[in-house]
Image: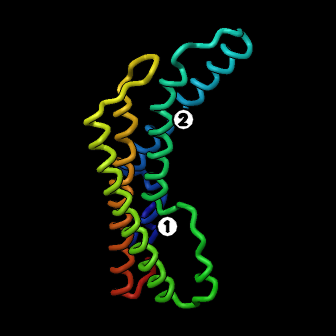
Protein backbone atom coordinates (compact mmCIF):
# COMPACT_ATOMS: atom_id res chain seq x y z
CA UNK A 1 0.00 0.00 0.00
CA UNK A 2 1.24 3.43 -0.71
CA UNK A 3 1.32 6.23 1.82
CA UNK A 4 -1.34 8.07 -0.20
CA UNK A 5 -3.80 5.25 0.39
CA UNK A 6 -3.10 5.13 4.09
CA UNK A 7 -3.06 8.80 4.92
CA UNK A 8 -0.67 10.11 7.55
CA UNK A 9 -0.48 6.90 9.52
CA UNK A 10 1.16 4.60 7.00
CA UNK A 11 2.89 2.70 9.81
CA UNK A 12 -0.46 1.16 10.74
CA UNK A 13 -1.10 -0.40 7.35
CA UNK A 14 -0.73 -4.16 7.14
CA UNK A 15 1.59 -5.36 4.43
CA UNK A 16 3.58 -2.17 4.23
CA UNK A 17 6.79 -4.07 3.48
CA UNK A 18 8.90 -2.91 6.42
CA UNK A 19 11.75 -5.00 7.79
CA UNK A 20 9.66 -6.79 10.41
CA UNK A 21 6.99 -7.72 7.87
CA UNK A 22 9.60 -9.20 5.56
CA UNK A 23 11.42 -10.98 8.39
CA UNK A 24 8.26 -12.52 9.85
CA UNK A 25 6.98 -13.49 6.41
CA UNK A 26 10.11 -15.47 5.60
CA UNK A 27 10.61 -17.00 9.05
CA UNK A 28 6.98 -18.12 9.36
CA UNK A 29 6.93 -19.40 5.78
CA UNK A 30 10.15 -21.32 6.36
CA UNK A 31 8.87 -22.82 9.60
CA UNK A 32 5.55 -23.88 8.10
CA UNK A 33 7.36 -25.48 5.15
CA UNK A 34 9.67 -27.39 7.51
CA UNK A 35 6.69 -28.62 9.55
CA UNK A 36 4.73 -29.59 6.43
CA UNK A 37 7.69 -31.44 4.89
CA UNK A 38 8.38 -33.22 8.18
CA UNK A 39 4.77 -34.36 8.49
CA UNK A 40 4.75 -35.45 4.84
CA UNK A 41 7.92 -37.50 5.34
CA UNK A 42 6.48 -39.03 8.50
CA UNK A 43 3.21 -40.05 6.80
CA UNK A 44 4.97 -41.48 3.74
CA UNK A 45 7.60 -43.42 5.66
CA UNK A 46 5.30 -44.67 8.41
CA UNK A 47 2.09 -45.49 6.55
CA UNK A 48 3.17 -46.06 2.96
CA UNK A 49 6.65 -47.55 3.34
CA UNK A 50 5.94 -49.04 6.81
CA UNK A 51 9.37 -47.78 7.98
CA UNK A 52 9.04 -45.05 10.63
CA UNK A 53 11.91 -42.57 10.84
CA UNK A 54 13.35 -42.69 14.33
CA UNK A 55 13.50 -39.30 16.03
CA UNK A 56 11.44 -37.40 13.47
CA UNK A 57 8.80 -36.49 16.07
CA UNK A 58 11.53 -35.12 18.34
CA UNK A 59 13.02 -32.92 15.66
CA UNK A 60 9.60 -31.66 14.56
CA UNK A 61 8.94 -30.35 18.07
CA UNK A 62 11.32 -27.42 17.59
CA UNK A 63 10.00 -25.84 14.37
CA UNK A 64 6.41 -26.59 15.42
CA UNK A 65 6.73 -24.81 18.77
CA UNK A 66 8.55 -21.86 17.24
CA UNK A 67 5.89 -21.67 14.50
CA UNK A 68 3.08 -21.50 17.08
CA UNK A 69 4.84 -18.93 19.23
CA UNK A 70 6.08 -16.72 16.39
CA UNK A 71 2.65 -16.93 14.74
CA UNK A 72 1.18 -15.57 17.97
CA UNK A 73 3.80 -12.82 18.01
CA UNK A 74 2.92 -11.95 14.42
CA UNK A 75 -0.79 -11.72 15.28
CA UNK A 76 0.12 -9.47 18.20
CA UNK A 77 2.32 -7.32 15.96
CA UNK A 78 -0.39 -6.94 13.34
CA UNK A 79 -3.06 -6.58 16.05
CA UNK A 80 -5.08 -9.29 14.28
CA UNK A 81 -5.52 -11.83 17.06
CA UNK A 82 -9.00 -13.12 17.82
CA UNK A 83 -11.15 -10.92 20.05
CA UNK A 84 -14.69 -11.03 21.33
CA UNK A 85 -15.46 -7.32 21.55
CA UNK A 86 -19.18 -7.44 22.21
CA UNK A 87 -19.07 -3.97 23.76
CA UNK A 88 -18.04 -2.45 20.43
CA UNK A 89 -21.57 -3.10 19.21
CA UNK A 90 -23.04 -0.85 21.89
CA UNK A 91 -20.38 1.86 21.85
CA UNK A 92 -21.03 4.31 19.05
CA UNK A 93 -18.25 6.91 19.36
CA UNK A 94 -14.67 6.68 18.20
CA UNK A 95 -13.54 7.92 21.62
CA UNK A 96 -15.50 5.11 23.29
CA UNK A 97 -13.87 2.54 21.00
CA UNK A 98 -10.45 3.97 21.83
CA UNK A 99 -11.13 3.84 25.58
CA UNK A 100 -12.34 0.24 25.22
CA UNK A 101 -9.16 -0.59 23.29
CA UNK A 102 -7.02 0.98 26.03
CA UNK A 103 -8.81 -1.08 28.70
CA UNK A 104 -8.29 -4.22 26.62
CA UNK A 105 -4.60 -3.47 26.11
CA UNK A 106 -4.07 -2.79 29.83
CA UNK A 107 -5.75 -6.10 30.75
CA UNK A 108 -3.66 -7.88 28.11
CA UNK A 109 -0.52 -6.25 29.48
CA UNK A 110 -1.26 -7.24 33.09
CA UNK A 111 -2.07 -10.85 32.21
CA UNK A 112 0.83 -11.03 29.75
CA UNK A 113 3.35 -9.72 32.27
CA UNK A 114 2.08 -12.24 34.81
CA UNK A 115 2.56 -15.04 32.25
CA UNK A 116 5.95 -13.60 31.31
CA UNK A 117 7.09 -13.89 34.94
CA UNK A 118 6.04 -17.55 34.92
CA UNK A 119 7.84 -18.06 31.60
CA UNK A 120 10.98 -16.49 33.09
CA UNK A 121 10.84 -18.92 36.03
CA UNK A 122 10.33 -21.82 33.63
CA UNK A 123 13.23 -20.68 31.44
CA UNK A 124 15.51 -20.50 34.48
CA UNK A 125 14.39 -24.02 35.43
CA UNK A 126 14.96 -25.29 31.86
CA UNK A 127 18.45 -23.76 31.85
CA UNK A 128 19.30 -25.28 35.22
CA UNK A 129 17.98 -28.78 34.44
CA UNK A 130 19.07 -28.85 30.77
CA UNK A 131 16.82 -31.70 29.69
CA UNK A 132 17.44 -33.64 26.49
CA UNK A 133 15.11 -35.41 24.13
CA UNK A 134 14.88 -39.17 24.76
CA UNK A 135 16.10 -40.50 21.39
CA UNK A 136 18.39 -37.94 19.78
CA UNK A 137 19.53 -36.16 22.98
CA UNK A 138 18.72 -32.73 21.58
CA UNK A 139 18.56 -30.12 24.38
CA UNK A 140 14.91 -29.17 24.92
CA UNK A 141 15.97 -25.73 26.13
CA UNK A 142 15.88 -24.53 22.52
CA UNK A 143 12.16 -25.21 22.35
CA UNK A 144 11.52 -24.11 25.96
CA UNK A 145 13.04 -20.68 25.34
CA UNK A 146 10.45 -20.01 22.62
CA UNK A 147 7.86 -19.27 25.30
CA UNK A 148 9.74 -16.44 26.97
CA UNK A 149 10.91 -15.02 23.65
CA UNK A 150 7.38 -15.03 22.28
CA UNK A 151 5.74 -13.62 25.40
CA UNK A 152 8.40 -10.92 25.64
CA UNK A 153 7.80 -9.84 22.04
CA UNK A 154 4.03 -9.96 22.52
CA UNK A 155 4.33 -7.69 25.55
CA UNK A 156 6.45 -5.23 23.56
CA UNK A 157 3.80 -5.11 20.85
CA UNK A 158 1.05 -4.75 23.47
CA UNK A 159 2.85 -1.75 24.96
CA UNK A 160 3.24 -0.31 21.47
CA UNK A 161 -0.48 -0.73 20.71
CA UNK A 162 -1.38 0.72 24.12
CA UNK A 163 0.80 3.76 23.41
CA UNK A 164 -0.89 4.20 20.00
CA UNK A 165 -4.36 4.10 21.59
CA UNK A 166 -3.42 6.54 24.36
CA UNK A 167 -1.90 8.89 21.79
CA UNK A 168 -5.02 8.60 19.64
CA UNK A 169 -7.20 9.38 22.66
CA UNK A 170 -5.19 12.55 23.26
CA UNK A 171 -5.35 13.73 19.66
CA UNK A 172 -8.93 12.62 19.02
CA UNK A 173 -7.96 10.61 15.96
CA UNK A 174 -8.85 6.92 15.53
CA UNK A 175 -6.05 4.53 16.49
> From the viewer's perspective, is residue 29 above or below residue 79?
above
Q: Residue at x 42, y 58 (%)?
A: 77
Q: Position of residue 91 (x, y in %)?
A: 58, 89
Would you call the spot at circle 1 few (<14 residues within 10 Å), some (14-19), or many (20 or more)?
few
Residue at label 1? 5
Q: Residue at x 39, y 74 (%)?
A: 106
Q: Position of residue 52 (x, y in %)?
A: 63, 13
Q: CA distance from mark 2 to mark 1?
A: 32 Å
Q: Position of residue 57 (x, y in %)?
A: 54, 24
Identify the image quadrant of residue 139.
top left
Residue at label 2? 32
**Helix or strand or loop: what does disc 2 sit on?**
helix
> From the viewer's perspective, is residue 19 above or below residue 80?
above
- Taking 50 as reference, is 76 left or right? left
Of 33 and 100, nearer the camera is 100
Q: Residue at x 38, y 22 (%)?
A: 138
> From the viewer's perspective, is residue 136 above or below residue 21?
above
**Helix or strand or loop: what does disc 1 sit on?**
helix
- Reading the chain from its start, which is encountered first: label 2 or label 1? 1
Q: Position of residue 56 (x, y in %)?
A: 53, 20
> From the viewer's perspective, is residue 27 above or below residue 46?
below
Would you call the spot at circle 2 few (<14 residues within 10 Å), some (14-19), or many (20 or more)?
some
- Taking 54 as reference, is 7 left or right? left
Where does the C terminus fall, quadrant-wise? bottom left
Amino acid sequence: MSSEMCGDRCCQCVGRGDGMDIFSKYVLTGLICIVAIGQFVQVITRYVLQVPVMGLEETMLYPTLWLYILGSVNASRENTHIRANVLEIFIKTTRGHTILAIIGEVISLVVGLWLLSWAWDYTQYAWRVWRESPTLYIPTFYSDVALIAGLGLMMLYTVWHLWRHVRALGTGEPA
